[in-house]
Image (cartoon, rainbow, N blue to C red):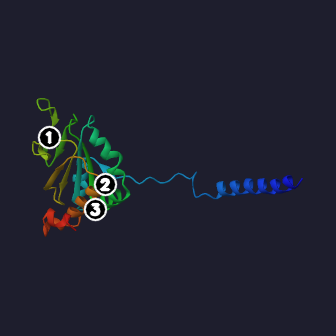
Amino acid sequence: MLQKTFLLPLLALLLFSSYTWHNVSPDENTPQKEVKINWLSIEEAAEKIKKQPRKVVIDVYTDWCGWCKKMDKSTFTDPAVVAYINKNYYAVKLDAEGKKPITLNGHTYTFKEQYRAHELAIALLQGQMSYPTTVYLDEKFNMLTPVPGYLDASTFHKILTYFGDNHHKSKTWEEYSRK
């Protein structure tokens, strides 16, 4: 009898606390707002830059590139990277093997079958076809630099701020990256 008297309140307490804990847990059923990079076409970025100048970051990728997909899933979803790009850059995704003609500044770039690459990708990568490559342009659409290879979020963010905050005008990359 003593055992029943002790177990019933304990069981009731356990049931109540698990019910309360389940109902008080923060927003587990509320969908979290996923913040994403505002990707544009290169033509859209060229138009926007005329009205509101910003630097441009271009992700040059291919559909078959595993490291490109890894950057999409990790680097380009990092909250600090997303926030910094959306505030300071126009972000462009460019399929290096895309077939659609692209017209910029009166010049039409097309897919070049003999190179199996888009002419704009060839120009941006300066003929060094490597995927992924991130290309940085200034506010006047002039080349700053292409950066080939996979970049984790931390390294990518450091490069973004190097150009985005204009450190490239006063420091070498080596000086800046030591800090």
Q: Residues within 10 Å of mark 1 (few under 14, many from 20)?
A: some
Residue visible at 27% across and 42% down in the picture: 67
What amino acid is at disc 1?
Answer: Met
Q: Which residue is mark 2?
A: 153
Q: Residues within 10 Å of mark 3 (few under 14, many from 20)?
A: some
Residue visible at 9% across and 42% down in the picture: 127
Q: For this view, does 105 lie left or right of residue 73?
A: left
Distance between the alpha carbons at the discs numbered 1 and 2: 22 Å
Q: For this view, does 6 lie left or right of residue 47?
A: right
Instruction: Answer with mark 1 or mark 2, whichever residue precedes in sequence.
Output: 1
Residue 126 placement (x, y as % from top left): 10, 45
Q: Residues within 10 Å of mark 2 (few under 14, many from 20)?
A: some
Q: Which residue is mark 3?
A: 88
> Given this view, does label 1 or label 3 mark the residue nearer the observer?
1
Residue 176 placement (x, y as % from top left): 18, 66
Q: Which residue is mark 1?
A: 129
Given residues 45 and 167, the one toward you in this image is 167
